[in-house]
């Protein structure tokens, strides 16, 4: 499929260049429905937008995964120089203003790691500080080293966002992958509509051109028959009116074709393509889809199912947050490390002293006048609302699949009937035309046969359009190709 797409795009590019270089030579493109859909899935504005949406979801997921890997960070100040006058308190309690000149430099290297199971964090750090004091009596330098610091922070009885994030984010990313496939299938469906819009406009030109030629021929014959007195003047005038109507219809069909061609080129992202000849699809799938099989595939493959599950988990997460914030909470912070200070750099790491820090902070709501309880009730009510909406959405989801499958299974029969009616109408018109030429029927019967021929052709094209639209609609609704008997997949590494 990639080779055919690359060949098609190369052909279109070569045709555009040839058309630019030889504007006087019209270049005509013969495109099938499958080729049009391939181009739309690759370079249409909708395809580009879908690709960028997926890439955004991909990098969001990568950021989520990276958040659980150790993070190395450097913080440095090189240097911090200041000179000012500051108040200093003397031993006798009096304050005097002293001029100070000082420069400080520092560097800290830290390694942090999240603990998703508990919601805490551990860290390892090392650092070095230097102070330079400038005075009239002499300059002085001092160093402060922290060879190693090991610590952790741990919320107790608090809401753990990491726990819920690890449930939600993988679902969100898988949902984005399936939605991208659905977006491409939606593009296929839209390309199918643009294809048949242009095809119908193209066929209308052919029909109206043929009608004009036939009516002009009949008009010329009628003038001869009128001069011989074999037909009345009103019949001749009716033939002349048919010619004028055919000319008007042909002009209108050309305008409709240009409008359809503009929309077609705009959606597919084609430039400098002035003449497109579409090939009428003839392949019929001859498929009958079981409703239960379609439902099973839709439940397995559609992004909506993952979205429903994600929404329920998110609602439960908000309930957990509200409950945590309305009760006793505590935070534990502990650090153990080594430190040393010296006037010379060579001594700052000699015989370091140990240092410890332990802090436990508590938060106890005593009187909140029901604020916390209200938030919990709101979160629980929202969870029940989400669950209700999800259940209703599931019913609507299955109902849509059921109706679309039943409709699809009737489309092929309708197409066969429309095709047979079109063939019969063509034959009837030709018979009526021949009978009119020999004077067996009048112009009224001939016009009726002509109108029926045109309507039958349009009904056949409408049935053909519905048939292919139904096929791509089933692909979009189930993300399953029943013609190839396999799920629709993509190589996401190439996006």
Image: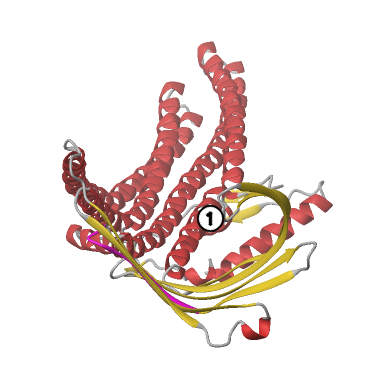
Determine whether, in the image, residue 469 is placed left or right of residue 81.
left
Q: Position of residue 280 (x, y in %)?
A: 49, 52
Q: Residue at x 28, y 56 (%)?
A: 310
Could you say whether the residue bearing mark 1 is in a helix, strand or loop?
helix
Q: Position of residue 99 (x, y in %)?
A: 73, 52
- Residue 217: tell me if it is visible: no
Q: Could you say which quadrant of the image residue 168 lies in? A: bottom left
Q: Residue at x 17, y 60 (%)?
A: 292
Determine whether, in the image, residue 401 is placed left or right of residue 75.
left
Q: Could you say which quadrant of the image residue 446 lies in? A: top left
Q: With respect to residue 344, does 222 lie above or below?
A: above
**Residue 281 colored in magenta in the image:** no
Q: Position of residue 272 (x, y in %)?
A: 72, 47
**Residue 155 colored in magenta in the image:** yes
Q: Principal SS element in the magenta part?
A: strand
Q: Label 1 belongs to which residue?
A: 52
Q: Residue at x 20, y 40 (%)?
A: 378
Q: With respect to residue 112, does 283 lie above or below?
A: above
Q: Residue at x 37, y 47 (%)?
A: 419
| Front in this rendered view, residue 132 or 48 | 132
| Front in this rendered view, residue 122 or 345 | 345
Segment tinted magenta in the rendering: 148-158
Residue that sits furthest to the front in the current view: 92
| Front in this rendered view, residue 267 or 285 | 267
Q: With respect to residue 463, does 471 lie above or below?
A: below
Determine whether, in the image, residue 410 is placed left or right of residue 271.
left
| Front in this rendered view, residue 410 or 397 | 397
């Amino acid at each position: 499929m990639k080779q055919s797409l690359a060949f098609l795009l190369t052909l279109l590019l070569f045709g555009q260049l040839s058309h630019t270089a030889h504007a006087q030579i019209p270049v005509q493109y013969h495109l099938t429905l499958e080729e049009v859909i391939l181009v739309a899935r690759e370079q249409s504005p909708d395809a580009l937008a879908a690709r960028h949406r997926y890439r955004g979801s991909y990098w969001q997921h990568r950021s989520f995964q990276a958040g659980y890997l150790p993070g190395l960070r450097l913080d440095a100040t090189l240097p911090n120089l200041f000179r000012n006058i500051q108040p200093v308190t003397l031993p006798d309690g009096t304050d005097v203003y002293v001029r100070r000149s000082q420069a400080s430099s520092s560097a800290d290297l830290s390694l942090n790691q999240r603990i998703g199971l508990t919601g805490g964090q551990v860290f390892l750090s090392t650092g070095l500080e230097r102070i330079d004091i400038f005075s009239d009596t002499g300059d002085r330098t001092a160093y402060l080293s922290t060879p190693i610091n090991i610590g952790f922070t741990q919320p107790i009885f608090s809401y753990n966002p990491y726990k819920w994030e690890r449930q939600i984010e993988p679902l969100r990313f898988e949902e984005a992958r399936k939605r991208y496939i659905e977006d491409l299938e939606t593009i296929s469906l839209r390309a199918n509509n643009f294809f048949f819009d242009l095809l119908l406009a193209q066929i209308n030109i052919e029909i109206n051109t043929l009608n004009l030629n036939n009516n002009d021929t009949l008009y010329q014959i009628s003038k001869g028959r009128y001069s011989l007195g074999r037909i009345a003047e009103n019949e001749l005038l009716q033939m002349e009116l048919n010619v004028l109507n055919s000319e008007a219809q042909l002009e209108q069909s050309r305008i409709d074709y240009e409008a359809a061609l503009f929309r077609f080129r705009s959606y597919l992202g084609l430039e400098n393509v002035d003449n497109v000849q579409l090939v009428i699809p003839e392949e019929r799938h001859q498929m009958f889809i079981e409703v239960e099989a379609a439902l099973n595939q839709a439940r397995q493959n559609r992004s909506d199912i993952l979205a429903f599950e994600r929404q329920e988990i998110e609602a439960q997460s908000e309930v957990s947050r509200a409950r945590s914030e309305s009760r006793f909470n505590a935070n534990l912070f502990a650090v153990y490390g080594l430190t040393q200070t010296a006037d010379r750099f060579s001594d700052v790491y000699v015989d370091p002293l140990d240092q410890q820090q332990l802090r436990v902070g508590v938060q106890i709501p005593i009187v909140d006048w029901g604020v916390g309880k209200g938030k919990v009730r709101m979160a629980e009510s929202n969870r029940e609302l989400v669950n209700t909406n999800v259940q209703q959405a599931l019913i609507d989801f299955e109902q849509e699949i059921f109706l679309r499958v039943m409709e699809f299974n009737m489309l092929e029969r309708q197409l066969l009937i429309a095709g047979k009616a079109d063939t019969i109408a063509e034959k009837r018109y030709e018979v009526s035309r021949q009978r009119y030429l020999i004077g067996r029927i009048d112009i009224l019967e001939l016009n009726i046969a002509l109108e029926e021929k045109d309507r039958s052709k349009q009904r056949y094209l409408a049935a053909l359009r519905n048939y292919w639209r139904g096929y791509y609609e089933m692909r979009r609704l189930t993300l399953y190709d029943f013609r190839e008997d396999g799920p629709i997949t993509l190589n996401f590494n190439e996006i």
